[in-house]
Image (cartoon, rainbow, N blue to C red):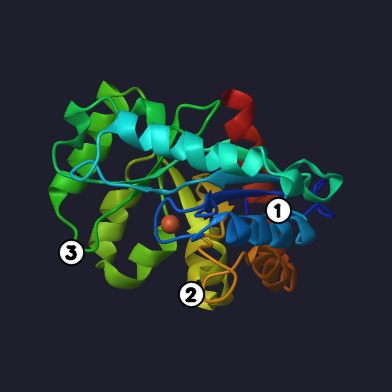
Amino acid sequence: MNTRISRQNANNRFRTDFHSHCLPDMDDGAENLEISLKVLQMCREQGIKKIVASPHYYLHKEKVESFLTRRQIAYDQIISSPEYNSSSLGIDIIKGAEVRLEKDISFTDISPLCIEGTRVLLLELPFVPYSPWMTDEIWNLSQTSQVTPMIAHIDRYIGIYKQKHIDRLLAERYCVYQVNAEALRFKKVIKSVYRMAEEQYQLVIGSDCHNLTVRPPNIPSAHAKLRKSKAGQELVDYMLRCSEELFAKG
Ligand SMILES: [Fe+2]
Protein backbone atom coordinates (compact mmCIF):
# COMPACT_ATOMS: atom_id res chain seq x y z
CA MET A 1 0.00 0.00 0.00
CA ASN A 2 1.11 3.55 -0.67
CA THR A 3 3.45 4.96 1.95
CA ARG A 4 1.19 8.02 2.28
CA ILE A 5 -0.76 5.91 4.75
CA SER A 6 0.20 7.11 8.19
CA ARG A 7 1.16 4.65 10.90
CA GLN A 8 1.02 7.18 13.67
CA ASN A 9 -2.66 6.45 14.27
CA ALA A 10 -1.95 2.78 14.82
CA ASN A 11 -3.37 2.83 18.34
CA ASN A 12 -6.42 4.86 17.45
CA ARG A 13 -9.87 3.51 16.88
CA PHE A 14 -12.62 4.60 14.55
CA ARG A 15 -14.17 7.50 16.43
CA THR A 16 -16.62 8.75 13.83
CA ASP A 17 -19.63 6.88 12.56
CA PHE A 18 -20.57 8.37 9.20
CA HIS A 19 -23.88 6.61 8.77
CA SER A 20 -26.47 6.16 11.50
CA HIS A 21 -30.24 6.07 11.81
CA CYS A 22 -30.09 7.11 15.44
CA LEU A 23 -32.56 10.02 15.39
CA PRO A 24 -35.91 9.16 16.95
CA ASP A 25 -38.98 8.50 14.83
CA MET A 26 -37.49 9.75 11.56
CA ASP A 27 -37.39 6.60 9.45
CA ASP A 28 -36.97 2.85 9.92
CA GLY A 29 -34.24 3.52 12.49
CA ALA A 30 -34.70 4.35 16.19
CA GLU A 31 -38.43 4.25 16.91
CA ASN A 32 -38.40 6.68 19.80
CA LEU A 33 -36.21 8.76 22.08
CA GLU A 34 -35.60 5.91 24.48
CA ILE A 35 -34.12 3.72 21.74
CA SER A 36 -32.14 6.65 20.33
CA LEU A 37 -30.52 7.26 23.68
CA LYS A 38 -29.72 3.58 24.11
CA VAL A 39 -28.16 3.48 20.65
CA LEU A 40 -26.06 6.54 21.50
CA GLN A 41 -25.04 5.00 24.80
CA MET A 42 -23.94 1.85 22.99
CA CYS A 43 -21.93 3.95 20.52
CA ARG A 44 -20.28 5.80 23.35
CA GLU A 45 -19.35 2.54 25.05
CA GLN A 46 -17.78 1.49 21.76
CA GLY A 47 -15.55 4.57 21.74
CA ILE A 48 -17.47 6.57 19.13
CA LYS A 49 -17.18 10.34 19.66
CA LYS A 50 -18.97 11.66 16.61
CA ILE A 51 -22.05 10.35 14.83
CA VAL A 52 -23.46 11.51 11.54
CA ALA A 53 -27.20 11.17 12.03
CA SER A 54 -28.37 10.22 8.56
CA PRO A 55 -32.09 9.49 8.33
CA HIS A 56 -33.42 8.36 4.95
CA TYR A 57 -34.54 11.10 2.62
CA TYR A 58 -36.65 10.51 -0.50
CA LEU A 59 -37.24 13.49 -2.73
CA HIS A 60 -40.34 11.94 -4.33
CA LYS A 61 -41.98 11.70 -0.90
CA GLU A 62 -41.02 14.89 0.91
CA LYS A 63 -39.77 18.41 0.36
CA VAL A 64 -36.31 19.24 1.69
CA GLU A 65 -37.69 21.91 4.04
CA SER A 66 -40.18 19.54 5.60
CA PHE A 67 -37.48 16.93 6.18
CA LEU A 68 -35.19 19.52 7.78
CA THR A 69 -37.97 20.55 10.16
CA ARG A 70 -38.67 16.96 11.17
CA ARG A 71 -34.96 16.28 11.59
CA GLN A 72 -34.50 19.33 13.80
CA ILE A 73 -37.37 18.22 16.04
CA ALA A 74 -35.85 14.74 16.36
CA TYR A 75 -32.40 16.18 17.05
CA ASP A 76 -33.77 18.61 19.65
CA GLN A 77 -35.49 15.74 21.44
CA ILE A 78 -32.11 14.16 22.01
CA ILE A 79 -30.06 17.18 22.90
CA SER A 80 -32.66 18.55 25.31
CA SER A 81 -32.98 15.25 27.15
CA PRO A 82 -31.44 14.96 30.63
CA GLU A 83 -29.74 11.72 29.58
CA TYR A 84 -27.89 13.41 26.73
CA ASN A 85 -26.90 16.33 28.89
CA SER A 86 -25.60 14.19 31.69
CA SER A 87 -21.88 13.48 31.50
CA SER A 88 -22.58 9.88 30.46
CA LEU A 89 -23.32 10.73 26.82
CA GLY A 90 -20.34 12.67 25.58
CA ILE A 91 -21.02 12.20 21.90
CA ASP A 92 -21.37 14.74 19.10
CA ILE A 93 -24.35 14.34 16.82
CA ILE A 94 -23.83 15.84 13.39
CA LYS A 95 -26.94 16.27 11.30
CA GLY A 96 -26.98 14.67 7.88
CA ALA A 97 -29.21 12.56 5.67
CA GLU A 98 -29.05 9.43 3.56
CA VAL A 99 -30.43 10.73 0.30
CA ARG A 100 -31.82 8.24 -2.18
CA LEU A 101 -30.52 8.88 -5.67
CA GLU A 102 -33.46 9.51 -7.98
CA LYS A 103 -33.78 10.54 -11.58
CA ASP A 104 -33.68 14.34 -11.93
CA ILE A 105 -32.80 14.87 -8.27
CA SER A 106 -30.08 17.24 -9.50
CA PHE A 107 -32.79 19.73 -10.50
CA THR A 108 -33.41 20.33 -6.78
CA ASP A 109 -30.97 22.11 -4.50
CA ILE A 110 -30.21 19.27 -2.17
CA SER A 111 -27.19 20.87 -0.50
CA PRO A 112 -29.01 21.62 2.81
CA LEU A 113 -28.90 17.85 3.34
CA CYS A 114 -25.10 17.74 3.39
CA ILE A 115 -23.34 16.54 6.52
CA GLU A 116 -23.36 19.58 8.79
CA GLY A 117 -20.21 21.65 8.47
CA THR A 118 -19.23 20.03 5.15
CA ARG A 119 -20.29 19.98 1.49
CA VAL A 120 -20.50 16.19 1.61
CA LEU A 121 -23.80 14.50 0.78
CA LEU A 122 -24.45 10.87 1.73
CA LEU A 123 -26.12 9.27 -1.29
CA GLU A 124 -27.81 5.89 -1.44
CA LEU A 125 -28.18 4.25 -4.83
CA PRO A 126 -31.52 2.61 -5.64
CA PHE A 127 -31.81 -1.18 -5.42
CA VAL A 128 -32.11 -1.72 -9.12
CA PRO A 129 -29.52 -2.84 -11.65
CA TYR A 130 -26.99 -0.19 -12.55
CA SER A 131 -28.02 2.25 -15.23
CA PRO A 132 -25.99 5.14 -16.68
CA TRP A 133 -28.50 7.72 -15.41
CA MET A 134 -27.15 7.03 -11.91
CA THR A 135 -23.61 8.16 -12.57
CA ASP A 136 -24.93 11.03 -14.72
CA GLU A 137 -27.10 12.15 -11.82
CA ILE A 138 -24.25 11.86 -9.30
CA TRP A 139 -22.10 14.05 -11.51
CA ASN A 140 -24.92 16.55 -12.11
CA LEU A 141 -25.58 16.78 -8.38
CA SER A 142 -21.95 17.52 -7.69
CA GLN A 143 -22.18 20.36 -10.20
CA THR A 144 -25.63 21.85 -9.61
CA SER A 145 -25.66 21.59 -5.80
CA GLN A 146 -21.88 21.95 -5.50
CA VAL A 147 -21.60 18.92 -3.24
CA THR A 148 -19.16 16.07 -2.82
CA PRO A 149 -21.23 12.91 -3.08
CA MET A 150 -20.47 10.23 -0.49
CA ILE A 151 -21.68 6.92 -1.87
CA ALA A 152 -23.33 5.04 1.01
CA HIS A 153 -22.31 1.43 1.68
CA ILE A 154 -20.25 0.90 -1.46
CA ASP A 155 -19.72 -2.68 -0.21
CA ARG A 156 -23.38 -3.43 -0.96
CA TYR A 157 -22.92 -2.80 -4.67
CA ILE A 158 -19.78 -4.93 -4.77
CA GLY A 159 -22.14 -7.84 -4.14
CA ILE A 160 -24.93 -6.98 -6.58
CA TYR A 161 -23.48 -5.00 -9.48
CA LYS A 162 -21.48 -6.42 -12.34
CA GLN A 163 -17.78 -5.59 -12.11
CA LYS A 164 -17.97 -3.26 -15.12
CA HIS A 165 -20.70 -1.29 -13.34
CA ILE A 166 -18.72 -1.13 -10.11
CA ASP A 167 -15.81 0.15 -12.17
CA ARG A 168 -18.10 2.77 -13.69
CA LEU A 169 -19.21 3.86 -10.22
CA LEU A 170 -15.63 4.02 -9.02
CA ALA A 171 -14.66 6.13 -11.99
CA GLU A 172 -16.30 9.05 -10.17
CA ARG A 173 -13.06 9.95 -8.41
CA TYR A 174 -14.47 13.13 -6.87
CA CYS A 175 -16.76 11.05 -4.62
CA VAL A 176 -16.18 9.80 -1.10
CA TYR A 177 -17.06 6.15 -0.50
CA GLN A 178 -18.62 4.96 2.76
CA VAL A 179 -18.18 1.33 3.81
CA ASN A 180 -20.52 -0.43 6.23
CA ALA A 181 -18.73 -1.89 9.25
CA GLU A 182 -20.78 -5.06 8.96
CA ALA A 183 -19.42 -5.81 5.48
CA LEU A 184 -15.83 -5.79 6.70
CA ARG A 185 -16.43 -9.25 8.14
CA PHE A 186 -15.96 -10.56 4.62
CA LYS A 187 -12.52 -11.08 3.12
CA LYS A 188 -13.80 -10.24 -0.36
CA VAL A 189 -14.98 -6.83 0.82
CA ILE A 190 -11.77 -6.14 2.75
CA LYS A 191 -9.82 -6.99 -0.40
CA SER A 192 -11.88 -4.65 -2.57
CA VAL A 193 -11.77 -1.81 -0.04
CA TYR A 194 -8.03 -2.29 0.44
CA ARG A 195 -7.57 -2.00 -3.31
CA MET A 196 -9.54 1.24 -3.23
CA ALA A 197 -7.30 2.55 -0.46
CA GLU A 198 -4.23 1.67 -2.48
CA GLU A 199 -5.66 3.75 -5.28
CA GLN A 200 -6.24 6.64 -2.86
CA TYR A 201 -10.04 6.68 -2.96
CA GLN A 202 -11.55 8.64 -0.09
CA LEU A 203 -12.96 6.02 2.26
CA VAL A 204 -14.85 6.28 5.53
CA ILE A 205 -16.69 3.83 7.77
CA GLY A 206 -20.27 3.85 9.03
CA SER A 207 -22.36 1.46 11.08
CA ASP A 208 -25.66 2.11 9.24
CA CYS A 209 -27.14 1.19 12.62
CA HIS A 210 -30.92 1.24 12.93
CA ASN A 211 -31.58 -0.15 16.40
CA LEU A 212 -30.15 -2.19 19.26
CA THR A 213 -30.84 -5.65 17.94
CA VAL A 214 -30.95 -6.47 14.23
CA ARG A 215 -28.74 -3.60 13.06
CA PRO A 216 -26.92 -2.30 16.14
CA PRO A 217 -23.85 -0.04 16.31
CA ASN A 218 -20.96 -2.31 15.33
CA ILE A 219 -17.90 -0.34 14.36
CA PRO A 220 -15.55 -1.89 16.96
CA SER A 221 -16.15 -5.37 15.56
CA ALA A 222 -15.00 -4.17 12.15
CA HIS A 223 -12.05 -2.54 13.79
CA ALA A 224 -11.13 -5.74 15.61
CA LYS A 225 -11.43 -7.77 12.42
CA LEU A 226 -9.22 -5.38 10.47
CA ARG A 227 -6.60 -5.26 13.19
CA LYS A 228 -5.94 -8.96 12.69
CA SER A 229 -3.95 -8.45 9.51
CA LYS A 230 -1.28 -6.02 8.39
CA ALA A 231 -3.44 -5.00 5.43
CA GLY A 232 -6.37 -4.46 7.77
CA GLN A 233 -4.33 -2.25 10.08
CA GLU A 234 -3.17 -0.18 7.15
CA LEU A 235 -6.75 0.15 6.04
CA VAL A 236 -7.82 1.37 9.49
CA ASP A 237 -5.09 4.00 9.46
CA TYR A 238 -6.01 5.09 5.96
CA MET A 239 -9.72 5.41 6.72
CA LEU A 240 -9.00 7.34 9.90
CA ARG A 241 -6.98 9.81 7.93
CA CYS A 242 -9.72 10.18 5.29
CA SER A 243 -12.26 10.91 8.08
CA GLU A 244 -10.07 13.59 9.60
CA GLU A 245 -9.42 15.21 6.22
CA LEU A 246 -13.11 15.25 5.38
CA PHE A 247 -14.02 17.36 8.41
CA ALA A 248 -10.87 19.47 8.10
CA LYS A 249 -11.84 20.44 4.54
CA GLY A 250 -15.34 21.43 5.67
FE1 LIG B 1 -28.68 3.69 5.98
Residue 188's label in the rendered image is 2
The residue tagged 3 is 129
User: Reading the chain from its start, which is encountered first: label 1 or label 3?
Assistant: 1
Ligand 1 positioned in quadrant:
bottom left
Three-letter amino acid code of the residue under disc 3: Pro
Q: Nearer the viewer, mark 1 or mark 2?
A: 1
> From the viewer's perspective, is 116 left or right of 99?
right
Identity of the residue drawn at 54% across and 62% down? 209
Please, what secondary structure does the residue beneath circle 2 have? helix
**Which x, y percent locates residue 118?**
52, 27
Is residue 170 in sight in this rendering? yes
- Quadrant containing the N terminus in the rendered view: bottom right
Q: Is residue 41 above or below residue 212?
A: above
Q: Nearer the viewer, mark 3 or mark 2?
A: 3
Q: Residues within 10 Å of mark 1 (few under 14, many from 20)?
A: many
User: Reading the chain from its start, which is encountered first: label 3 or label 2?
Assistant: 3
Identity of the residue drawn at 43% across and 32% down? 114
**Which x, y percent locates residue 85?**
77, 41
Q: CA distance from mark 1 to mark 2?
A: 21 Å
Three-letter amino acid code of the residue under disc 2: Lys
User: Reading the chain from its start, which is encountered first: label 1 or label 2?
Assistant: 1
The residue tagged 1 is 14
Question: Is residue 96 or residue 222 the one in the foreground?
Answer: 96
